[in-house]
Amino acid sequence: MSYQPIENYGMIGDLHTVALVGMNGSIDFMCYPHFDSPTIFAALLDYRNGGAFQIAPQHDGITHRQMYLPDSNILLTRFLSPEGVAELSDFMPVQDSGHVHRLVRRIKTVKGRFRYRLLCDPRFDYGRSRHRAEIKDGGVLFSLDEKNTFFLRSPIPVKIKDGAVIAEFTLEEGQTAAFVFEEYRDAGSSESGHPHYVSTAFKETLNYWRRWISRCKYQGRWREMVHRSALVLKLLTSHSDGSIVAAPTFGLPEEIGGERNWDYRYTWIRDASFTVYALLRLGFTDEAAGFMGWIGDRAGELRADGSLQIMYGIDGRHQLSEENLSHFEGYRGSSPVRIGNGAYGQLQLDIYGELMDSIYLYNKYGEPISFNLWENVVRLVDWVTKNWQQADEGVWEVRGGRQEFLYSRVMCWVAVDRAVRLAMKRSFPAPLDRWLKARDQIYWDVMKNFWNSEQKHFTQTKDLNTIDASSLLMPLVKFISPTDPRWLSTLRAIEKNLIEDSLVYRYCRTNAASDGLSGREGTFNMCSFWYVENLSRAGDPDQARFVFEKVLSYANHLGLYSEELGPCGEHLGNFPQAFTHLGLISAAYNLDQRLNAAGRLRV
């Protein structure tokens, strides 16, 4: 066993957690039973000590294929050889209540005859705790403690070795074997023991996903990629809390062998707000409403001064202390492997703009917001009007000290601007004179202090003349016209300094604001999609389309994206990432409209 490339995985889930399934039939990452629970399988981070659950043929010369059942999150992994074809179906049933978080795996010999090997080797509590494994009627009971017991239901005889379940079995053409991993309650009463459970659950899960995606209103170009991105975002949404995780993984490196390895299993105000924008565009108002409910709860927990944290646990908890899992070697030796995220204590002023933009859009395209939420919005925006001039850690969460960042300043303008618009649209009581004055002050500050008149571009910070890809959002949030001469010259500077072919780096490594970390990083996929949208809005839809198609070619075989791409197109960083997929949706939506307006045929 060795490390599979990050892009070799597909994702399944039940709106409480997800599992990553490799093309070799191995589940190498799964937190259980929730997104931010400890891992039970983490071979992706340490293939010797992390734990895995693999079902695969024991034959030479096997080639692998993966696909999703159309319009669903049911994953099919196919094994092809001169001896025949085998197919592994993986899914997690979605249930509204009484959830036991089942993982269902069904292997079938489609053609020929195969000998299979099963390995179910859970390593609980991030691989830090030893468990007991005991063969029971119908399967194996894994016991960590009284509150953590799990059951693997198996139709074939198995053996236990060092706490792992192993088995070898043969299936003739047309034969199947199904395995169910679930929280243990009473194996005798579990519905998974019913002889038709797997086939029934398969059909119900397929119907659930097809009903859900059928609500999508997008009918434009790249429909399949947009639908897949929507299905990804839905999988990253907590059914019980309404929050949206930035990514379901932790510790996947931005540089192989480097230290840029973070835990993304939490809800960033920024990422989730943009996700709501994408979901609203596609017509998924229920998910937007769920997140607004979560936001309403966070707004009710504002600090005494009216400010927010930048991120929270999926259940809204505030404390996300960071620690290193020193016993994990990290993906291909990339350490440290961190859980928790120390950035939760940072000051990032941009989050107020993203949040207010999502509230404004939800009020416009979803449902009118409540007066209780508005009262908290007033407190929040008042805080912004008093603190927008502060230095902060910025959108990239630098750990090299606070600075005055352009993007933070622009998004403070967005926060106040959207609050003004919302107050006037709904006739809400608000200190409009004070807000309008602050909005204009922020605008002039950006135009005077972040514009380099010699190099003709907006700068990353007040003190540095370097360029930053986050400025690509300036026209997208309507701070500046996409055809304004100042913006067009900034776009040319970005193309010169940050873009390689179609892919965009976050910022120049030379003279950039220090992020406090060693090593390099790849290109940022979401920035590449922002670039596409800028080209489209600037009046060049043909070039935008060309670049967009190039960026789409970097998706993995299932249409999934990680956070970054390496020099050879390899995926880097946590996977799959919500921000990348919502950037894809936004770029496709806007570009499709521009191409239609330009009279371009759909091909």
Image (cartoon, helix red, strand yellow):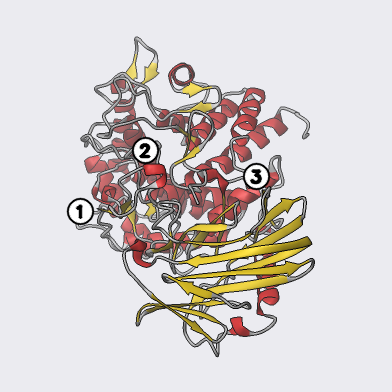
Q: Secondary structure at mark 1?
A: loop
Amino acid type at circle 3 is Met
Amino acid type at circle 2 is Gly
First reached walking from the N terminus: tag 3 or tag 2 = 3
For label 3, the crowd category at 10 Å Cα-Cα, with few meaning under 14, some 14 to 19 and many 20 or more, is some
Q: Secondary structure at mark 3?
A: helix
In the image, is residue 219 above or below residue 466?
A: below
In the image, is residue 375 above or below residue 168?
A: above
Q: Secondary structure at mark 2?
A: loop
First reached walking from the N terminus: tag 1 or tag 2 = 2
* Separation of marks 3 and 1 at Cα, in angstroms: 43 Å
In the image, is residue 365 above or below residue 512?
A: below
Quarter occupied by residue 497 = top left
Q: Which residue is mark 2?
A: 257
Q: Which residue is mark 1?
A: 305
- Is residue 211 or residue 593 the one in the foreground? 211
